[in-house]
Amino acid sequence: MDPLRDFLEIPYDQLEEMNTAAKIARMERVPVDQVTEERHRYLTDEKRIKAVTVCFSDLEGRLHMLDYDKRFLLKSGDNLTFDGSSIRGFSEQHESDLRLAIDWPAFYWLPADVFGPGKVLVFAEVRERDGSPYHADLRSRLKDFTENMYKKDGTVCNAANEIEGFLFKGGDAERRYPKTGAFEFISTGGYYHSLPGDPLRRFIDCAAEVQRAMGFTNEKDHPEVAPSQFEMNYSYTEASIAADQVQLYKLLCRQVAQNLDMTASFLPKPVAGVNGNGMHTNLSLSRDGQNLFHDAKGKDGLSASGWEFIDRILSNAPDLCLVLNSSVNSYRRLDPAYEAPNQIKASASNRGAMVRIPVANERSARVEVRSVAPDANPYLVIYSLLKTGLEGPVETADETKRARTRYLPDNIHDAIRIFKASRYSTELLGEVAHGKFAEAKMASAERCPKALGNRVKSLEVQFHHEVTNQYLWSDF
């Protein structure tokens, strides 16, 4: 190391302790003022920090990061502004200025060997010029919803996401796809098939260590069904924390892969002919430490309230499809030939059903929504599923209706049409955010061939919301 510089570097075991303690404080709802004071004091006293990375997500779910000088952030933290007109789905040019409000409890210490020394990370909420919540910031929407649930009767909303991804050779493989026309697998093994020292296993091992150090509470990690496919599972937590962890999971995977001259891709179906990537979203409710979805005597071990939750989601499944599958490419994944969860039904065993009831005990009983793509906005997904499951309109449900099979839209154009015409999805998001989301999705759809066909088209990668850049959009 350059002897003139002494930047913060924390061992992994210590990182795990610090990040886990911060996570527990969030779960226990330690007063924000108290946490804010502690974070300010820490940043003031810790001389080895060179920058604070402030993160926020846009309407489509892209993660944006701004690095602030520590001293500037402490002095001007109540007046952080940015140009919202440069972010698709946010403000218009004539109303461009938006604010960032630092969410100090959502604070993370970073592994220096992956993210660079001397940096810490914190999430922020997007605000209007007057400081009120911004309509297109779904992180604030989810956080407010779960807080209101807790204040009403002590109900805690829990979530866990199982996020699959592909690992490809070379950096920036997605942006190079329009020129190369192909992704190159790092491994051709498959489910659980990976030798300890091969490139896929090295990536998984490294990423899992970073994940653990950032307080995720790891459970298991392994290669998935398709060649070069991976999944690293971690424990459930409070819903707004879980949504943050989705963004961090994808960030750390991409960063670890880049450091290894590889690309971690969360396109739902980057390669035709093999299984796609999903983001199975597990949800449960608890009160006073009791899992409200568990009933040992209930059908499939689920309580009556758990089945009501499912019935509301199934009743509104077509309206929510665009929220759960928000890219052109994601409709390739809803292919029944590859364990695709495209059936609007619930099942304990049928993996083609969009909702599964896993085998579980009192602690782990949950509802698993399988029809979620990994490129969807996690805040929007979890908010929509929770609010729909608890408050959405529901058809009169009986065993006959549950057994009847309907299907999700198989292309984004049909999903957009249903979404735009849906009174419920408009009420769910609000008229302005609903319109902006539909407009952003249509902008992508119109740049791609309408028929998906049997080959992944370069345009569905090039104009994907997590891949593309401003230059490509303006150059269309």
Image: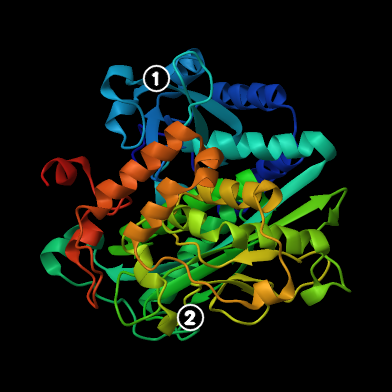
Q: Can the viewer see residue 382?
A: yes
Residue depicted at 51% across the width and 18% down the height: 74
* Visible residue check, residue 118: no
Disc 1 and disc 2: Cα gap in Å? 45 Å
Residue in the image at 51% along x and 54% along y = 320
What residue is rendered at 14% in x and 62% in y? Answer: 178
**Looking at the picture, which amino acid does disc 2 mark?**
Glu
The disc placed on residue 241 is none
Chain-order first, disc 1 or disc 2: 1
Vertical comparison of 121 with 202: above or below: above
Q: Say which of marks 1 and 2 sits in front.
A: 2
Assign the N terminus to one quadrant of the image: top left
Mark 1 secondary-structure assignment:
strand
Classed neighbour count for the residue bearing mark 2: other residues with Cα under 10 Å, few (<14), some (14–19), many (≥20): some
Q: Quadrant of residue 435?
A: top left
**Residue of label 2:** 339
- Residue 81 bears which disc, if any? 1
How many numbered tags mark residues here?
2
Foreground residue, 299 or 254?
Answer: 299
Horizontal and vertical percent position of residue 359? 73, 76
Residue in the picture at 49% in, 13% down: 130
Q: Position of residue 377 (x, y in %)?
A: 46, 49
SS for callout 2: loop
Contact (CB < 8 A) between labels 1 and 2? no
Image position of 343 (left or right of 293): left
Q: Residues within 10 Å of mark 1 (few under 14, many from 20)?
A: some
Q: Is residue 144 above or below residue 461?
A: above
Q: From the viewer's side, name the closer residue of 224 and 116.
A: 224
Could you tell me residue 169's position as x and y percent? 26, 70
